[in-house]
Image (tube, rainbow, N blue to C red):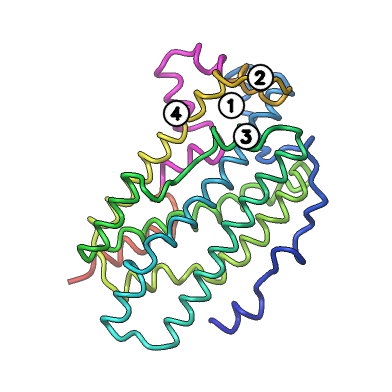
Amino acid sequence: MRLVQEEKQWDLERDLPWASLDATRALLPDCRALADALTLTPAEELACSQLLGLMAVQAISEHEKILGVVRDLCWRRPLARIDAGDDVVKLGEQFFKEEAKHSLAFARYVETFAQGRGIDAASLHAVLPSYRARSWSTAAFVLNSLLGGRAIWWLVMITEEESLALFRDIRSRKAEVEPLFFALNQQHFEEEIRHSSYAPLMLRMLGTSRADFLLAETLHRVWVLRQLLRLRRLGRSTETSGFYADLRSVLAKFQRLPWRHRLALVATKIPYVSQLMQPRRHKAIGIELQRTAELP
């Protein structure tokens, strides 16, 4: 597995067409249901699609970055205690290397998009997802790892399955998707497929419980809702570009809806975001949960 991953790994500079960015194209093209519900103009729908796509890749970047914060507690120390062997350790080192590269690549895309769209990157980051190393949710994963739990590996599984689903959603509509966004997610998809077995391997080797999954699922859902609340900053933004003007209009239309209607939209009609709230929908998660339930 490690040799295959090393042979097939892609290079951040050589294998991505960074100059191909087309800031006039959609990132997540499946916004029709949301556009109809909010009666969005074409410009508002495009801006919404682009913001949701940026939120998706930023969320993946932030999750993969936070794994490095707890790497020692959730990986190196537990493996040393069970004497896992060099092959498993080396495979893990390649896994962490790839995750760090993915985080850098998605972060770079956000910066590249901001430049191409003519907007301030700092203002954009103010509304995009953030997973801080000193946050209470990170502290909860650290405490779980200290107590022998494996919740962080469930979060890794959830993030990987969501990133795979993201590419499957845009793959059938390639002609509508911004070229660099598509290429980056395709490279990410292929590498995630190759190392997607590592998180389940850790859960099985190190031992886990349904309580670990429930903790990861709960923290993940709360984190997603907190990131959505960051979008309220759009209403206070002083940015004057068309991108921000369109997003403020979308936010105003959303806020005018009854609160129950808003919750329904979040739960069912917002591309990628609605799926984030349902980690159990992924087949691989269900299989691993079933395996956990069968443990003595």
The image shows residue 77, relative to residue 99, as above or below, that is below
Badge nearest the viewer, 1 or 4? 4
Q: Quadrant of residue 248?
A: top right
Q: What residue is pinned by disc 4?
A: 229
Secondary element at image label 1: helix
Q: Quadrant of residue 82?
A: bottom left
**Residue displayed at 53% across by 64% down:** 99
The image shows residue 36, relative to residue 183, as above or below, that is above
**Residue displayed at 59% across by 26% down:** 34
As measured in the structure, the alpha-carbon distance from the residue carrying label 4 to the one carrying label 3 is 14 Å
Secondary element at image label 3: helix
Q: Amino acid at mark 4?
A: Leu
Q: Amino acid at mark 1?
A: Leu
Asked if the residue at tag 3 contacts the one at tag 2, i.e. Cβ–Cβ closer than 8 Å, the answer is no
- Split into 4 quadrants, where in the image is the C terminus? bottom left
Q: What residue is pinned by disc 2?
A: 40
Is residue 262 a member of the stretch shown in magenta? yes
Of the numbered discs 4 and 3, the one sitting upstream in the chain is 3
Secondary element at image label 2: loop
Q: What residue is pinned by disc 1?
A: 34
Q: In terms of depth relative to the viewer, which is nearer, 185 or 64? A: 64
Badge nearest the viewer, 2 or 4? 4
As measured in the structure, the alpha-carbon distance from the residue carrying label 2 to the one carrying label 3 is 14 Å
Of the numbered discs 2 and 3, the one sitting upstream in the chain is 2
Mark number for residue 51? 3
As measured in the structure, the alpha-carbon distance from the residue carrying label 1 to the one carrying label 4 is 18 Å
Say whether residue 96 is left or right of residue 187.
left
Q: In terms of depth relative to the viewer, which is nearer, 140 or 258? A: 140
As measured in the structure, the alpha-carbon distance from the residue carrying label 2 to the one carrying label 4 is 21 Å
Of the numbered discs 1 and 2, the one sitting upstream in the chain is 1
Say whether residue 86 is left or right of residue 143.
right
